[in-house]
Image: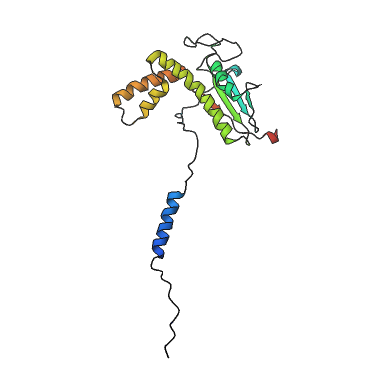
Amino acid sequence: MPRRAGAPEVNAGSMADIAFLLLIFFLVTTTIETDAGLDRMLPPIEPPENDVVIKQKNIFQVNISKSGQLLADGNLTELTALREKAMAFLENNGDGSCNYCREGKKDPTSSDNPTKAIISLKNDRETKYGTYITVQNELVGAYNDLRNREAERLFKRSFTDMEAEYIKQETPPSVKAELKEKITRIQDMFPQKLSEAETSSSSSN
């Protein structure tokens, strides 16, 4: 009488190969989220100045509510109009000391000079991140538009192009030195003074 054969063994020899293939499939098909944010270079630390008095008219206040509504200097403003308002504020030339401000209306209730003008941005804690970034882009865009205009007038090329060439590693040091001088000159004409106030909660107001 033949002996009964034992339970068949499971062939586990290829399990490692299967696991390896599954790992490759996971790596190929999975999308890894990258953090989105603002690409900013912080200014160098400077010693605090004493007795700094900032006139209220030199501050352009921008508030974003939790529902995404925009207030610019106390007026309800559409996002599409924000950049133009910010540019008008920056080169208002209220004291007449800016000789390169073309569109300045010299409104006595607005900023005296681009070097004194400050844009203050404040948002609610419940403001959507996308809205916050969009408003930031418009305000930074106002500075860039004015800087590009002056760079075109003085150096026949845009400010953003000069910045892009300056940060390239392959740009020769002699060219970088020349670009840095030009970039600094334009930045001094329209210094980016964008202040962000602490977020608030509308429910606590």
Between 96 and 63, the one lying in front of the other is 63
Between 19 and 54, the one lying in front of the other is 19
Q: Position of residue 78 (x, y in %)?
A: 61, 23
The structure residue drawn at horizontal position 55% and vertical position 30%, both measured from the top left corner, is 134
Q: Tell whether 88 sits left or right of 44.
A: right
Which quadrant, please, contains the N terminus? bottom left
Q: Position of residue 30 (x, y in %)?
A: 47, 49
Asked if residue 25 is positioned above or below residue 154 in the image, the reply reads below
Q: Quadrant of residue 127?
A: top right
Residue found at the far bottom of this picture: 1
Q: Is residue 191 visible?
A: no
The structure residue drawn at horizontal position 53% and vertical position 24%, both measured from the top left corner, is 139
Which quadrant, please, contains the C terminus? top right
Q: Is residue 122 visible?
A: yes
Q: Tell whether 120 sits left or right of 191.
A: right
Q: Position of residue 166 (x, y in %)?
A: 36, 26
Q: Position of residue 168 (x, y in %)?
A: 35, 30
The structure residue drawn at horizontal position 59% and vertical position 17%, both measured from the top left corner, is 55
Residue found at the far front of this picture: 1
The structure residue drawn at horizontal position 30% and vertical position 26%, both measured from the top left corner, is 173
Q: Tell whether 57 sits left or right of 33.
A: right
So how many labels did they put on this image? 0
User: How is the protein colored in the picture?
Assistant: rainbow
